[in-house]
Amino acid sequence: MKIASRRTPFGDRLCFAEVIPRQLIDIQGAFVRRAERDGLHRDDALARSRLAVAGDLRGLLQADPQLTAVRDLFDWTLGQADTGVLDEDCLWSDVPELLGPPVGTPHTVWCQLANYPRRRLAPGEEPSPRGLQGCLKAPGALAGPYDNLRHPMISEQVDPEMELAVVIGPRSRFLTTDNALRAVAGYIGFCDVGSRDVSQQDNNRMDRGKGFDSYGICGPWFVTADEIPDPHTLRIRQWVNGEVRQDGSTAEMFHTIPQQLAWLTAALTLAPGDVLSTGTPAGHGSVRPGDVVRGEIEKLGVVENQVVLDD
């Protein structure tokens, strides 16, 4: 199941993606339509939908970390996709530029650092893992999958890194490597951007350098964990102006997702909808205004962003 966030004149709307070509199915709209088909008056169906279906992913996961009711509604929409029941009241056009970050505004966004080899290893060469480390990213840095990447005037080293990110389902503390994946509701593609020169100016603190507006590009949608049986076998690629910068695999991680979650939740409580970005393969580098950055993770879709001067 894939869930997107569509910007509309009525605010951001959660939608099922990749069910009907070039269309997104409004989740609350589909709830209303099913309730009407079951005999409920439209006004009552509308009122019930606002209570039953939260308007953002964090709210959906807070109410039901397993997304059981949403899965049931998704199954119903699959059966109605070709029947005409899902009319214009339930559908939005799939315009890439109108997609927002599918995770909305999480409480916590954590970015793992130094979790892949810094360079491509020669055949037979053994990697040199570093210890677990990372930093918080400001939730306000999150941007949609086709939003502009805003290049700050105060930085000369804007570095986008394509990463696999985990979205938390149930509230979690003291996870272990044995149970950590059960806390994962799903995954998103995540372009973690940083300004290395700003971090150096800030005594090597990452907070400001990682926290500029648009420095957390995510999407194009949230993909539930059942569609990704093994998150450690996914290809990650990034292009700048059509030239390949990164071409790696999540199999290269020094520390697996369960290891990262166990380490992180020894200190932090992760809430429903929180995000852990798991690090990036080698090959990334700085970009300039006018560049076009495209990132793709196998089974998770594509993000593509024009770099513009933030003035």
Image (cartoon, rainbow, N blue to C red):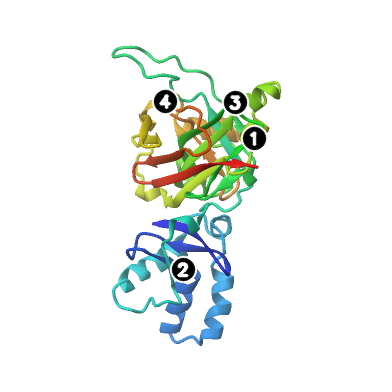
How far apart marks 1 and 3 lie (CA) works out to: 14 Å
53 over 126 or under it: above or below: below
In which quadrant of the rendered image does the C terminus lie? Answer: top right
Residue on which disc 2 sits: 26
Query: Mark 2 and 1 residues: CB-CB less than 8 Å, in contact?
Result: no
Quadrant where the image shows the N terminus: bottom left
Rendered image quadrant of residue 60: bottom right
Residue 273, image x, y percentages = 56, 50
Left or right: 93, with 80 as reference point: right
Near mark 1 (Cα within 10 A), the count class, few <14, some 14-19 or many ≥20, is few
- How many angstroms separate mark 3 from mark 2 (CA)? 40 Å
Instruction: Examine the rendered structure and indicate whether residue 136 appears above or below residue 113.
Output: below
| Kind of residue at badge 3 | Arg
> Residue, x 49% and y 39% (percent of image)?
290
Mark 4 and mark 2 lie on one chain; the one further toward the N terminus is: 2
Answer whether residue 126 is visible to the viewer in this image: yes
> Which amino acid, mark 4?
Gly
Q: Which residue is mark 1?
A: 153
**Amino acid type of the residue that numbered disc 1 sits on in the rendered structure:** Met
